[in-house]
Image (spheres, rainbow, N blue to C red):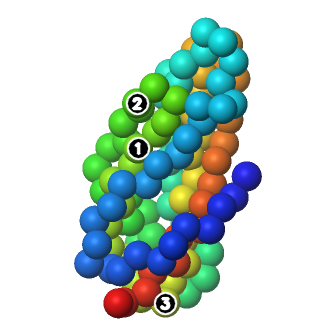
Amino acid sequence: MRTLWPAKDPAEKLVATFDYSEDLDVGETIASATLTCTLLSGTDADPAAVLYGSATIDAGTVLQPITGGVDGAVYTLRCQATLDPTGRVLVLAASLPVRTA
């Protein structure tokens, strides 16, 4: 599933939230999460730099600090969560436009 997030300014430091809580079965928790950031459109030599620091897991959500980005670019942030104890893998993605305010 991919959603469109509101635009962020390149100067903003925000936290991207990936909410898996409705998809978890009884007894499942998020054991780990892998996040990537790629360029959907526009120009940016290093789109992965939008990911700022490490993600944290808080119950059924994954929280990833984000920063920067290039004005006019649109990024795809993808979060792959592995669940415990089942080993199921769930993926959420979002498009993030960056626009100077």
Mark 1: secondary structure: strand
Crowd around label 2: few <14 · some 14–19 · many ≥20 (10 Å): few
Point out residue 18 in the picture as x, y percentages from the top left corner: 53, 46
* Residue at the image point whose x is 33% and y is 61% from the top: 14
Tell me if 67 is positioned left or right of 20 in this view: left
CB within 8 Å, label 2 to label 1: yes
Answer above or below: position of 29 versus 17.
above
* Residue at the image point whose x is 45% and y is 70% from the top: 47
Q: Specify the quadrant of the image occupied by residue 94.
A: bottom right
Task: Give residue 27's mark.
Answer: none
Task: Give residue 63's mark.
Answer: 1
| Residue 45 in sight | no
* Residue at the image point whose x is 49% and y is 90% from the top: 72
Answer above or below: position of 48 versus 93.
below
Residue located farthest toward the right when viewing the structure as drawn: 1
Q: CA distance from mark 2 to mark 1?
A: 7 Å
Q: Quadrant of the C terminus?
A: bottom left
- As shown in the figure, which amino acid type bears the numbered disc 3? Gly
Residue matched to label 3: 72
Q: Nearer the viewer, residue 4 or 38?
A: 4
Mark 3: secondary structure: loop
Q: CA distance from mark 1 to mark 3?
A: 24 Å
2 or 3: tag closer to the N-terminus: 2
2 or 1: tag closer to the N-terminus: 2
Closer mark to the observer between disc 2 and disc 3: 2
Residue matched to label 2: 58
Point out residue 85 in the picture as x, y percentages from the top left corner: 61, 10
- As shown in the figure, which amino acid type bears the numbered disc 2? Asp
Residue located farthest toward the front when viewing the structure as drawn: 22
Point out residue 11 in the picture as x, y percentages from the top left corner: 26, 78
